[in-house]
Amino acid sequence: MKAFKILLLTVFLGSMLFAASPAAAQCAACAASVETNAKNGNHETAGLNNGIMYLLAMPYLAVAIVGFIWYKKYRRKNVELNMRNEKLHLN
């Protein structure tokens, strides 16, 4: 069973590695186009900025949700502390 899981993981990672297509994005050209449109009074740049902020926030939101679920699932409930009633003498 363990060997099957390792094989499945290897096949999955290998397929991700070899199936990746190169990105044809031109970030410098896009940035220049957005700056030019903003100077000419076009308001599409606000939508682009909102989209960037949305994409930026999603990983943090996903980690926060997973952390909250983990906290709720694994926290201790109804823990009894059995402590003695006598005073502690540290000397």
Image (cartoon, rainbow, N blue to C red):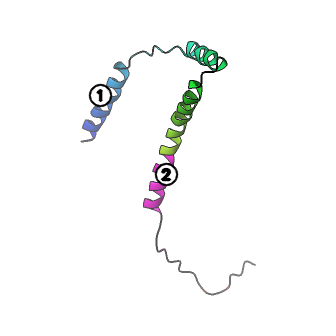
Looking at the image, which residue is at 50% across and 39% down? 58
Magenta extent? 63-80
Of residues 24 and 89, which is closer to you in this image? 24
Near-viewer residue (10 or 60):
60
Q: Along the polypeptide, which appears first: circle 2 or circle 1? A: 1
Q: How crowded is the residue under tag 1: few (<14 C-alpha within 10 Å), some, or many (20+)?
A: few
Q: Which mark is residue 65?
A: none
Q: Main secondary structure of the magenta part?
A: helix
Residue linked to disc 2:
67
From the viewer's perspective, is 86 left or right of 54?
right
Three-letter amino acid code of the residue under disc 1: Val
Q: 1 or 40: nearer the eye? A: 40
Quarter that holds the N terminus: top left
Dot 2 falls on a residue whose secondary structure is: helix
Q: Position of residue 68 (x, y in %)?
A: 49, 55
The residue positioned 55% from the left and 29% from the top of the image is 47
* Location of residue 49 (image quadrant): top right
